[in-house]
Amino acid sequence: MSGADRDGDSPRAPGAPPGGSSASTRYHACTLCETGCGLAFTVAGGEVTGVAPDDDDVFSAGFVCPKGMAINAVGDDPDRLRSPVRRDAHGAFRPISWDDALDLVCARLNGVRRAHGDDAVAVYMGTPVVHKHSALIMRSALLSALRTRNSTSAGSQDTSPRFAASYFLYGSSFSVPVPDVDRTHYFLCIGANPLVSNGSLLTAPDMRGRIRAIRERGGKVVVVDPRRTETARAASEHLAIRPGGDAALLFAMAQVLVARGRVDEARLRRDTRGWAALRERLAELTPERVSACTQIPKETIERIALEFADAPSSAAYARIGVCNGRFATLASFAVDLLNLIAGRLGAAGGALFSSPAIDFARLSRVLGIEGHGRFRSRVRGLPETLGDVPASTLAEEIETAGEGQVRALLTYAGNPVLSVPNGRRLAAALSKLEFMVSIDLYVNETTRFADVILPPAWSTSEDHVDFFFSNFAVRNVIRWNTPVTPRKESEREDWEILAAVARGMGDRPTGYRGVDWALRIAGRLGFRWTPAHAVDLALRLGPYGDRYLPFSSGLNGQKVRESVHGVDLGPLRTGFRHRVRHRDGRVDVAPPAILASFDELRRDIDRPVDPGELLLIGRRDLRSNNSWMHNIPALVRGRERCVLFVHPDDARRAGVEDGAVAVMESRVHEGQVRVRVTDEVRPGVVSLPHGFGHAEGAAFQRVAGAHAGVSANDWTDDQRVESVVGQSILNGVPVRLRRAAMSDRGASADAKSEPSS
């Protein structure tokens, strides 16, 4: 059964023809989240007339969520831009030709660089850059041409801690273990809601079915989360942890296993370096000591630690809730440590590494994006991760005068005004830029400040290859989908736009000197390079490739394209040494940055918990992915989603009622928000979904404007950062809540979200 079926949506778009010679079926992966479920499109007369799950897809096997069923509605959205626009002196956007738009963009960006230096141009990359293989390939070319250190991204908001932890542990940021959920007997899920996200660095369609299967084979699923999420409701047990306690909990579990003699000390000394130093520190974090800060009884901590070790197989996994916390890198590190010391890293049913057809861990070194802390931001000195400084630096880098001050900005498929902490500060800063260009489908809360917007073609009219997320999938698969319908003559693909800007800035079609020289020579002979050539090369030279050998049974681009439902390469393989890139081949469990963060945790762990303190956390909805799907009627219909969850005890204390508008205040913002009183959140915690706050974009996105809501990141503090990667702390934000005064009620339209009829 598809996710759409379970949510009451029709599994096939209305109006689909009954078939026959006038209709054909095309297959393409959904690009709206990282799972990439397979879809079957009915096409007649060059137009999509129906969308259904692809029952024969090697990965999703007929599963699809409501977002996938609405993918064509995004492409057909009347508010979506289809040609370049330029903002005039009155703030209105007027059409402009592609040639004129690209000439203007390159001239203005080059002018800023000549006058103020390379770092005066900043870049913000949104999440879709990793959903599109061609855009990801061109990212390096663009950054190479711009030569700026002011590069940031959505990933710097929610994945930098995970990638940094892998870099420290294994010597490669992209050596990220994946829980082998299809074979495990004990799944410990911390700060993640895979039933809604379909994984997230655990690329897995139909997580509801997979969790059900764990329980049906006699296994257990334990969810650790301050909220009783959709995943928690499907689990065997839910532990309502206090926000920020993840690292302490995981280290206390590790301490239990060490103290009870449940670890193989000889194996750890052989496979790791620094075990003695870490072991000594672990002894201090007992269940008794961490119970207060986690709000989980010590007996429970001991029990789940022993259950984890004693199960036939077990895997620990953590995601956004952990990656957005105060000790995000340390907690991400602690997840892998628990898997490692329990003997689950590299074991069937434990935490395994994928063996993808296109190995991004290897390619990352060639692409020049591997690393952490190679340089720091100008104003606060926050470190880069994978070439990106934290997104919270963007506003201050625009505001602060001096050499390297940001004066121009390029955004690609992102909406940082809604996704970066203290978004109102960033909005004010964007209005001061000398020039801004956005590559985006919409005029939104961020791109409304752009001087030029360059809209790409919709994803179903482009090739799609499992280039990035297959590296984090629960099964090894590869798919290469060709366009469902051809793009219009007037449209440009993402990579073509990025390549044109890169050439205009530095004549670097790929960003690699030798390759660019060869391509320029080949171009004079009539050869036109596209990202498809790069993908074919990566497939041929990859672990399953044909190596250009005649009569080889290995993979190449043509073979994968011809397999319209994808190629199944088998289950995850056991072992972990092949993913360790340190020269001595051992896992580093005591890198200095981690030990320093551990010592910070030790000092913080005994801080008394204020019983009256409220901590704000985020949440995600199955029908929403960040900020850009709220303009599709099918994805916003029904109940009001942008509401603040408040526990009944906290609601009584604050004097607020269910359905009322309350005032929430943090260090950086005070604003109104509608309340839903529910025991779905633990006492002391309030929860608001991210991605809303469309009041300023209502003129450009009519459906989203009618469901505007408020932006959770207005309340998050851009000055509170995690100590290792410098990422903003988006979960566990201290706030205060009170009843709205009579004079306040109705004064803030953006606090109201009208449910659709």
Image: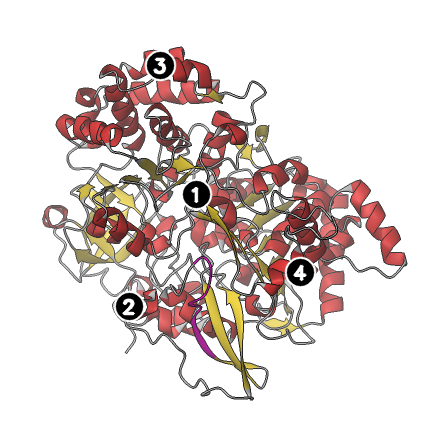
Can you say which quadrant of the picture contains the N terminus?
A: bottom left
Image position of 139 with respect to 18: above or below: above
Identify residue for label 2.
7
Task: Kindly identify the residue that appears in the image at 23 percent across and 29 percent down.
Answer: 310
Asked if the magenta segment contains residue 464, the reply would be: no
Number of the label disc, if any, that sits on residue 410? none
Label 2–label 3 contact, CB within 8 A: no
Q: Position of residue 591 (x, y in %)?
A: 47, 19
Q: Amino acid at mark 4?
A: Gln
Left or right: residue 707 versus residue 535 is left
Residue stretch in magenta: 50-59
Identify residue for label 4.
558
Task: Kindly identify the residue that appears in the image at 35 percent across and 33 percent down.
Answer: 326
Number of the label disc, if any, that sits on residue 158? 1
Number of the label disc, if any, that sits on residue 265? 3
Asked whether residue 642 is in view, the answer is yes
Q: Between marks 2 and 4, how big is the CA–CA gap? A: 37 Å
Q: Position of residue 756 (x, y in %)?
A: 30, 75
